[in-house]
Every structure is written in C-alpha cells, then in structure tokens.
Image (cartoon, rainbow, N blue to C red):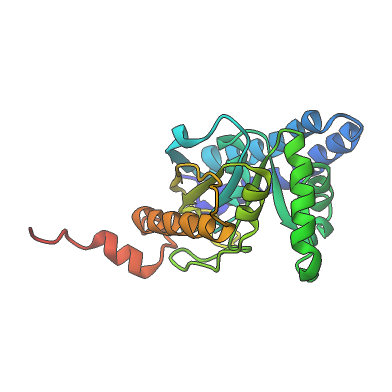
Amino acid sequence: MISLWMRNLVYWLVLIIVTPLFFCLLLLAAPLPRRRRHVLGVSWAMTLLWMLEHVIGLKYKVVGGENIPAEPGVIAAKHQSGWETLALQKIFPAQVYVAKRELTWIPLFGWGLVLMNPIIINRADRANANQRLLEQGLERKRHGFWITVFPEGTRTRPGVPGKYKLGAARMAKQFDMPMVPVAHNAGEFWPRNAFLKHPGEITVVVGPAIYPAEGAGPEAMMSEAEAWIEAQQRLIGGVGPFAHPDEKRSRLAPPAAA
C-alpha cells in the first residue's frame, strides 16, 4: 500500500505543476467576461479536489443539498482548513470569495485569485472595510455570483468556535439575498497549515436559507446562523484523526440508558 507520505507528495507535486499552468491560462483569459474566465479557476479547484479524493482518499458527502436556493445567496461557512475553499465551488453555483488582501500577495495563487473576482478586504483598515465589502459584494451580485464568506474570519480548530463577524449577514440584508449556513468537519482530516492531508470522509451540512426579515438586523441573522452551524458541528464532529478530544470522547461514549 502506498504510504500516506507518498500520496501527499504526489498531491503536492501535481499542485506545483498545475498551478502555474492554470495561472497562465487565466492570464490569457483575462480579457474574457468574468463568468467565462471563472470556469478556469474552478477547474483548478476541481483538479485538486479530484486529487484529494482519488490519491489521498479524502472523500466527502453533502447533507441538505436541497436547501440550496435557486437564486444567488451568501454562503456563511465554517472555516477549518483549505479543503472547503475548493469543495464549496463544486457544491454551490459560481461564487466569489471574501478574501483578505494578504492572499493576493502569494505568487501565482494570489495573482490568479485576483482574476477570479474576489471581494478583497484590508483588515487593517477597519474604518473602510465594511463599506468596501458592501460595494464589491453588490457589484458581484449584479454579475450573478454567489458570495462565500467565512464569518469567523480565519481558520479555527475543530471543536473550538471562533468569533462570528457580521459581514455575511450585512451583505445578505443589504442586497436582499438569502444567507445559507454551512457546517463541515474538514479540519479533522486537513488541519490548518498541515502538509499531510488524511484519508476519510468529510461531512458537509447545508442548512435552510435564512432570509432577511422586516425589522430584523444582521445581528439576528448571524446569531441564527451561528447557533445552527455550531449545533451541527457538535453532531458531525469527533470522527477524524484531528478531532477535538471532547468530541471524540462524546462520540465514543456508550449511549445513556433509558
């Protein structure tokens, strides 16, 4: 059997080879309409997702796919690893990400990211960050894109909730778009900043869309999304090699007697 290290080396080798190729194709496609060149970036993500599934053995299942609305919305997803940045592009229709400015500085990847029409924010400029978020988000909606936001702002360890920010709910409210909460346990197989990705099955749960309501502010929308996401995290957590110890123990504990 091929070792985990060898399979991961193959994955990284493919990543190193295909990333410059797709970047060159994106450069050539820069004059094309947004939606047409967007396909190239998604193809890069699908290539890596295929490698993860067929080389690493990291598969996934989606629960609640019927909750995805027909119209574009705001995806408010848990953020634990790099996996979800790839997989959400397959699970949902064409989308753009809210990304921190520093990601655009990464050679090739960052430059290609810019060509994928992300909503770029400067977290150091808090005074103008929200306004730019809303301006860019409205422009992306006009082009028919979904908008993906990680409300916690950064990757969090499994079993450790982060602080949920209001950007996703503000956009949903401002643009009259549904907000779709997404939970998953990818961090239990692909930890933050880890070289090794581990085989297993990730569970992704798509929740019912939260629609802007008369008289309800973004705080109420995000509070509802956070409560749903964290409840789902407790249900699906504890299965991977990097699961939180408490969630592992909870899953392994025998059921309480009636």
* Quarter of the rendering occupied by the N terminus: top left
Report the number of discs: 0
Along the viewing direction, whichever of 141 and 115 lies nearer the viewer: 141
Measured as percent of width and height from the top left, residue 227 is found at: 43, 59
Horizontal side of residue 11 vs 181, given as left or right = right
Q: Please indicate, yes or no, whether residue 189 appears anywhere in the rendered image.
A: no
Res. 170 image quadrant: bottom right
Can you name the residue that lies furthest to the front here? 215
Measured as percent of width and height from the top left, residue 166 is found at: 61, 61
Name the residue at 68% across, 44% down.
Answer: 175
Can you name the residue that lies furthest to the left here? 258
Horizontal side of residue 102 vs 214, given as left or right = right
Along the viewing direction, whichever of 101 and 251 lies nearer the viewer: 101
Name the residue at 62% across, 41% down.
Answer: 177
Measured as percent of width and height from the top left, residue 22 is found at: 79, 38
Res. 156 image quadrant: bottom right
Along the viewing direction, whichever of 221 and 114 lies nearer the viewer: 221
Q: Please indicate, yes or no, whether residue 27 appears anywhere in the rendered image.
A: yes
Seen in the picture, residue 65 relative to 184 is either above or below; the reply is above
Measured as percent of width and height from the top left, residue 121 is found at: 77, 59
* Quarter of the rendering occupied by the C terminus: bottom left
Along the viewing direction, whichever of 237 and 153 lies nearer the viewer: 153
Name the residue at 43% across, 65% down.
Answer: 159
Res. 144 image quadrant: top right
